[in-house]
Image (cartoon, rainbow, N blue to C red):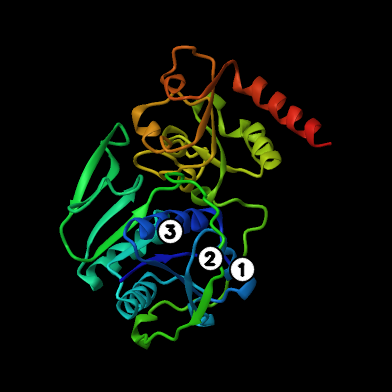
Amino acid sequence: MSVIAFAKNWNGKFKNSSYELVSYTKELANKLNTNLVVLSIGEVSTDELNTLGNYGADKIIAVNDPQLNTLTSRVYAKVISQVADKEGATIVVLSDNNSGKAIAPRVSVQMKAGMVAAVQEMPVSFDPFIVKKRVFSGKAFGHVQIDSEKKVLTIAKNCFGLIENKLDVVIEEFTPEVDANLFKVQVIEEEEQKNKVILSDADIVVSAGRGMRSSENWGPVEDLAEVLGAATACSRPVSDEGWRGHEEHVGQTGKVIAPNLYIAAGISGAIQHVAGISRSKCIVAINTDPEAPIFSVADYGIVGDVMEVLPKITEAIRNSKS
């Protein structure tokens, strides 16, 4: 028996979310007195694979197939299920990011396993198997019991942190049996977005709301995001007005994110918006209204006009870097 962790890579590189996943699953494997097997799909260098050993991977199964460089949830679920069967794994864990959300349900069906998404911490109990997750738009925690022998979990970003546990990892190559019919989507061409931080993966997010007054006033938001190496986001009213694209909308009906730093500029803090940012490690709010609900969830607050405050923050950061 073993625990399987699927560590996603981005163009052959792992990010902190993958290292957090390995840290979490290593602790889980220790509590179950079993081994951790980390699965990597797509072309990744040996040096990069070895970085997973810094966080407790006992063994890495590498599927270095260039045709799997592009994530296809059907194919990845098939590969993960085959590896789980090969290793006799009863628990498979993925990160609760876009790819994990797409793949985990398919793995659950193929393994005939119970599944819980966005788990917050180590299981509350192992017999029965009970995990903890946020419910009611992040306003409360709930306990969920999985009764099936096999289990699939996704872990929420920033729920566990990084724990270094350097091991001499064993890397094993694996060639899965994948039906060609599963490759129903063929990638003809890829175009890289330069200087664009992906919102769902960002460690820092600069977000703004109607306090910016119009779409033409977004310059200070983008300037601050640039100096911080951050992604930009917005509240629902902003995307509804067409000031920004819906792909930047954060909240209950948009993207749910968990950056290390979330800056909310000119956002009042409706409960639907807070539901999408409640897992952020640190929230900084800027608003002219000292009674704005956003201040009740913020770690730091600035009462002031965003059009004046944002440029000053940007200037201070630039000066500190020069």
Type of the residue with mark 1: Glu
* Residue of label 2: 9
Mark closer to the chain start, 3 or 2:
2
Query: Nearer the viewer's eye, disc 3 or disc 2?
Result: 3
Type of the residue with mark 2: Asn
In the picture shown, does residue 18 fall above or below 252?
below
Q: CA distance from mark 1 to mark 3?
A: 18 Å
* Residue of label 1: 48
Q: CA distance from mark 3 to mark 2?
A: 19 Å
Q: Quadrant of residue 49?
A: bottom right
Q: Position of residue 266 (x, y in %)?
A: 52, 24
Quarter of the image with the C terminus in it? top right
Mark closer to the chain start, 2 or 1:
2
The residue located at (65%, 21%) in the rendering is: 309
Are the residues tagged 2 and 1 within 8 Å (C-beta)?
Answer: yes
Quarter of the image with the N terminus in it? bottom left
Type of the residue with mark 3: Lys
Q: CA distance from mark 2 to mark 1?
A: 10 Å
The kind of secondary structure element at disc 1 is helix
Q: Is residue 214 left or right of residue 229?
A: left
Q: Position of residue 256 (x, y in %)?
A: 40, 44
Are the residues tagged 1 and 3 within 8 Å (C-beta)?
Answer: no
